Image: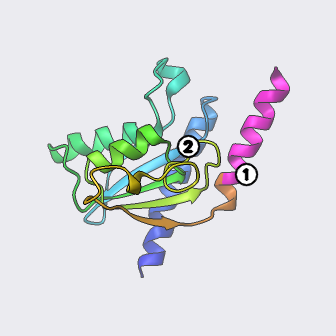
């Protein structure tokens, strides 16, 4: 049953990634779920917003906090198509999200074990459960996006 839910919520994160791609943004998408309801969603908007912090996770977490009326997202699960960077991982930990479902590994900036591990940083008492989906679609989407970007230069 839980795996089916992963599929449904994760597909929403994928839709967000495709929205980012349609705006010529790095194709990363994210949703935050609590009590079976999507309470936040986002996709990368760094170029559009001219804002280096406009990552999918930041946008989705802000929306979720607004929906709940609190910055404490205890009991929420974040679904994201690409392993979060250290900035996003810190925000995830700070907002007290308890579980993160990750589509693809980010070998250059990933902060859930690829390059760094947010779990090793203080406060150590706030652990985050991580589920790796190893989603080829999301990985391929990133690869093709950056290949196309390099060919334009």
Classify residue 96 as left or right of residue 111: left
Tell me the CA gap for discs 1 and 2: 12 Å
Whether 147 is among the magenta residues is yes
Q: Earlier in the sequence, mark 1 or mark 2?
A: 2
Which residue, given by chain and number where applicable, does mark 2 sit on? 28
* Furthest residue toward right: 151
Q: Name the residue rendered at 55%, 22% in the picture.
A: 47
Which secondary structure, mark 1?
helix
Could you say where residue 98 lies in the image, as x and y percent from the top left? 30, 61
Q: Which residues are magenta?
A: 139-153
Whether 4 is among the magenta residues is no
Q: Nearest the camera: 22 or 72?
A: 72
Which residue, given by chain and number where applicable, does mark 1 sit on? 140
Which secondary structure, mark 2?
loop
Q: How many labels sit on residues?
A: 2
Classify residue 55 as left or right of residue 147: left
Could you say where residue 5 lies in the image, as x and y percent from the top left? 43, 71
Quadrant for the N terminus in the image: bottom left
Query: Badge 1, how many Cα within 10 Å: few under 14, some, many 20+?
Result: few
Could you say where residue 46 lies in the image, as x and y percent from the top left? 51, 26
Q: Name the residue rendered at 64%, 29% in the picture.
A: 24
């Amino acid at each position: 049953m839980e795996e089916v839910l992963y599929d449904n919520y994760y597909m929403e994160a994928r839709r967000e990634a495709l929205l980012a791609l349609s705006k010529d943004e790095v194709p990363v998408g994210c949703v935050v779920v609590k009590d079976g309801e999507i309470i936040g969603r986002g996709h990368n908007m760094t170029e559009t917003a001219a804002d280096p912090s406009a990552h999918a996770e930041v946008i989705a977490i802000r929306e979720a906090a607004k929906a709940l009326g609190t910055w404490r997202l205890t009991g929420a699960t974040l679904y994201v198509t690409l392993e979060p960077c250290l900035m996003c991982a810190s925000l995830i930990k700070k907002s007290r999200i308890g579980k993160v479902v990750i589509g693809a590994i980010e070998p250059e900036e990933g902060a859930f074990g690829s390059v760094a591990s947010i779990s090793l940083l203080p406060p150590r008492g706030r652990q985050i459960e991580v589920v790796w989906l190893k989603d080829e679609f999301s990985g391929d989407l990133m690869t093709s996006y950056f290949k196309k970007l390099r060919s334009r230069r």
